[in-house]
Amino acid sequence: METNLEKISSVVGVLEAKEEKIIKGTRNRIIIVIAFGLIILAGIGGLIYWNIVSARVYIENASVSAPVTNLAPTVGGTLQEVYVNVGDLVKMSAPIARIGNELIKASSDGQILSINTNIGASFAPAQAVATMINPNDLRVVGQVQEDKGLKDIKIGQEAIFTVDTFGSKEYSGIVDEISPTSNAGDIVFNISGTRQEMDFDVKVRFNIAQYPELKNGMSAKLWIYK
């Protein structure tokens, strides 16, 4: 005959089994809810990312640059004197060098990029003794393929860019110019019959005074808002 102790033990065992079943069920429901929540968050994150990406044209191949001006004699002769160093900021008409009896002057306000200091060297007419840029002409110049968003780029659109030198730091600018013709020199012919997509230059203007650390020749990445 079953004793009271045995009856109590049996009841306790049944209760423990039910409790364990309830705990397992609750745990499974929690896991399902968490998994479902993660899926929803991933979906929302993916949608946000897609909206951001689809709203911009990304140009990986870009650089900070300005037109380079060559400073050269008109008649030629021997280099007699040099008055500037690389990196100097000069004013328009400032003396740069003297070749023979000709004084070579800066054609505009700007910065000296290179200067030949080999006194006694001979220079032919139009042979550059120095090169310079006007920092106010600095732009971020990117190359975009005609099928990679060129149709979505318009003058006046906002843009952001980064330069490799300063990592992920973001700079802002405005689309200033879109080349009317492709970089024909980049055409590569092949025998596969695949159409060659042309690259076009897109120039972004930025505040030179606000970003004085940006220098001619720095590599950059560019995002243009549609």
Image (cartoon, helix red, strand yellow):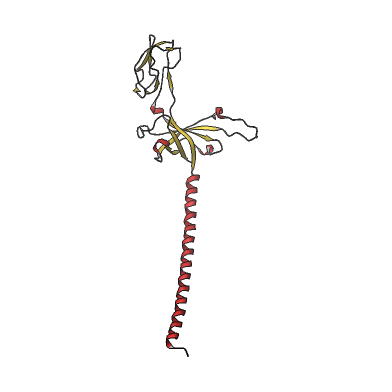
Give x and y (percent) for residue 42. Answer: 48, 54
Q: Residue furthest bottom?
A: 1
Residue at the spot x=52%, y=32% of the render? 200
- Nearest the viewer among 67 and 25 is 25
Residue at the spot x=47%, y=52% of the render? 45
Quadrant of residue 136 within the rendered picture: top left
Give x and y (percent) for residue 223. Answer: 46, 39
- Nearest the viewer among 78 and 137 is 78
Give x and y (percent) for residue 127. Answer: 45, 15
Quadrant of residue 183 within the rendered picture: top right
Residue at the spot x=46%, y=65% of the render? 30
Q: Residue furthest top?
A: 101
Q: Is residue 151 left or right of residue 13?
A: right
Give x and y (percent) for residue 38. Answer: 47, 58
Q: Would you place residue 136 above or below residue 28 in this image? A: above
Quadrant of residue 122 within the rendered picture: top left
